[in-house]
């Protein structure tokens, strides 16, 4: 570990000065932050961790240089009397900038509007200038650095950089990466044994899920499983849908977390909503691949999905089959034996993942293989 830290320090002390500057200038072609991020990601894939940090730091320096230059350009426009007289409305200022042929400033303003939207700046030119400091941060680079430190067992440093990445998540090139950052923060908190933070980060993922944040819906939703009958399973999966796919992993992890804590109602809510999200995702995928497909039963959906290796692989890599198993497990813990028994039987006969199919089979007693079970014989 010490050798790795010294190697990183050597990189920072000897490479970053190359990016330092005394005169504000535009980032040269080939030195853009996104190019260094591509290199850093390739370094990560090849386990070249020191190089990954080097290129991530280059990306951060490039992002700052770009923001400094943009701020310099925007501030310089205020030296023109006509620009000052135009007021603070972005569109009014932009019109004058075009008339004066201040092309660099026009380019900066138009790009910011295109990437952020004019409402992001409340339509004010002054707010656009103030925002450049925020734009100087590169969350993707901080995320990569955090990943390296976590792999090296430096959890405190990993947490520091990952928190930085989340703080400036609005700068992400791909906005949905915000959820990956939150999952990483939860994983680091788990490594550190910080249960409160672990729960907090996972709940942050769910803030964007309109179903989870609707208390009335969640109460009505989970009470449906109170109909403790075998046909309740099919009614449940036929009635509800949820396309909040980014929250599936959070719901799965929280259901296990709450179950260990003895908070069965919360565990039931998370596992139920996670399971519905899974079925919704698989259903939409099957509609794209099978002409005329429509949902009929849970058994039919799982059997058809098992024919696609990528769906099975996706499910195994993203806790999908485990979440369905946990839903059956949680309903059993909540005393809904008939509902749970039926769900375990379906999973035992239809899941494309061998491990979780066998786990489900261990919870039921099948005297003879079902018709669906024969798919895997």
Image: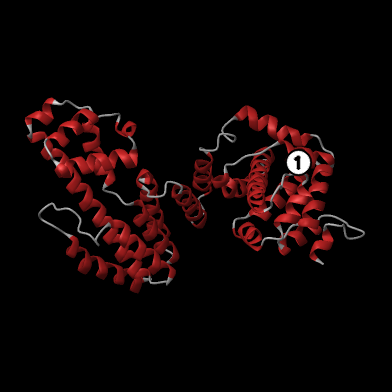
Count of marks overlaid on the render: 1
Viewer-proximal residue, 209 or 124?
Answer: 124
Colouring of the image: secondary structure
Q: Would residue 30 be found to the left or right of residue 188 on screen? A: left
Q: Residue at x 30, y 68 (%)?
A: 8
Q: Would residue 353 be found to the left or right of residue 243 on screen? A: right
Residue 150: x %, y % from top left: 43, 62
Within 10 Å of disc 1 (Cα), the crowding (few <14, some 14-19, many 20+) is some
Q: Would residue 213 be found to the left or right of residue 146 on screen? A: right
Q: Is residue 266 above or below residue 24?
A: above
Residue 364: x %, y % from top left: 84, 55
Q: Which residue is mark 1?
A: 334
Q: Quadrant of the C terminus?
A: bottom right
Q: Residue at x 24, y 33 (%)?
A: 127
Answer whether residue 261 is visible to the viewer in this image. no
Q: Would residue 89 be found to the left or right of residue 237 on screen? A: left
Answer whether residue 29 is visible to the viewer in this image. yes
**Residue 315 appears in which quarter of the rendering?**
bottom right
Q: Residue at x 61, y 58 (%)?
A: 314
Q: Residue at x 81, y 34 (%)?
A: 227
Residue 340: x %, y % from top left: 79, 46
Q: Is residue 132 above or below residue 155?
A: above
- Classify mark 1: helix, strand or loop: loop
Q: Is residue 83 above or below residue 29?
A: above
């Amino acid at each position: 570990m010490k050798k790795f830290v010294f190697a990183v320090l050597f990189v920072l002390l000897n490479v970053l000065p190359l990016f330092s500057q005394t005169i504000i200038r535009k980032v040269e072609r080939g030195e853009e932050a996104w190019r260094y991020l591509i290199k850093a990601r390739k370094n990560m894939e090849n386990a070249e961790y020191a190089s990954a940090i080097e290129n991530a730091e280059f990306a951060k320096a490039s992002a700052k240089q770009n923001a400094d230059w943009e701020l310099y350009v925007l501030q310089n426009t205020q030296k023109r009397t006509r620009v000052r007289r135009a007021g603070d409305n972005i569109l009014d200022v932009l019109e004058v900038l075009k008339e004066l042929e201040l092309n660099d400033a026009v380019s900066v303003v138009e790009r910011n509007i295109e990437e952020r939207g004019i409402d992001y700046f409340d339509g004010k030119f002054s707010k656009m200038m103030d925002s450049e400091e925020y734009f100087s941060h590169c969350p993707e680079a901080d995320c990569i650095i955090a990943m390296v430190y976590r792999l090296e067992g430096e959890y405190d440093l990993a947490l520091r950089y990952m928190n930085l990445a989340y703080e400036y998540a609005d700068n992400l090139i791909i906005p949905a990466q915000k959820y990956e950052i939150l999952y990483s923060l939860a994983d680091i908190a788990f490594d550190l044994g910080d249960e409160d933070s672990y729960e907090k980060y996972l709940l942050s993922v769910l803030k964007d899920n309109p179903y989870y944040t609707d208390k009335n819906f969640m109460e009505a939703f989970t009470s449906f499983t109170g109909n403790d009958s075998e046909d309740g399973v099919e009614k449940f999966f036929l009635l509800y849908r949820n396309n909040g796919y980014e929250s599936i992993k959070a719901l799965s992890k929280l259901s296990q977390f709450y179950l260990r804590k003895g908070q069965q109602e919360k565990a039931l809510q998370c596992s139920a909503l996670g399971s519905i999200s899974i079925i919704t995702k698989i259903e939409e995928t099957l509609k794209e691949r099978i002409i005329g497909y429509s949902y009929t039963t849970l058994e039919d959906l799982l059997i058809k999905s098992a024919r696609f290796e990528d769906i099975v692989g996706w499910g195994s890599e993203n806790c999908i089959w485990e979440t369905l198993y946990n839903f059956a497990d949680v309903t059993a813990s909540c005393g809904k034996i008939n509902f749970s028994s039926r769900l375990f039987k379906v999973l035992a006969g239809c899941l494309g993942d061998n491990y979780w199919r066998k786990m489900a089979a261990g919870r039921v007693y099948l005297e003879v293989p079902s018709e669906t079970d024969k798919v895997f014989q």
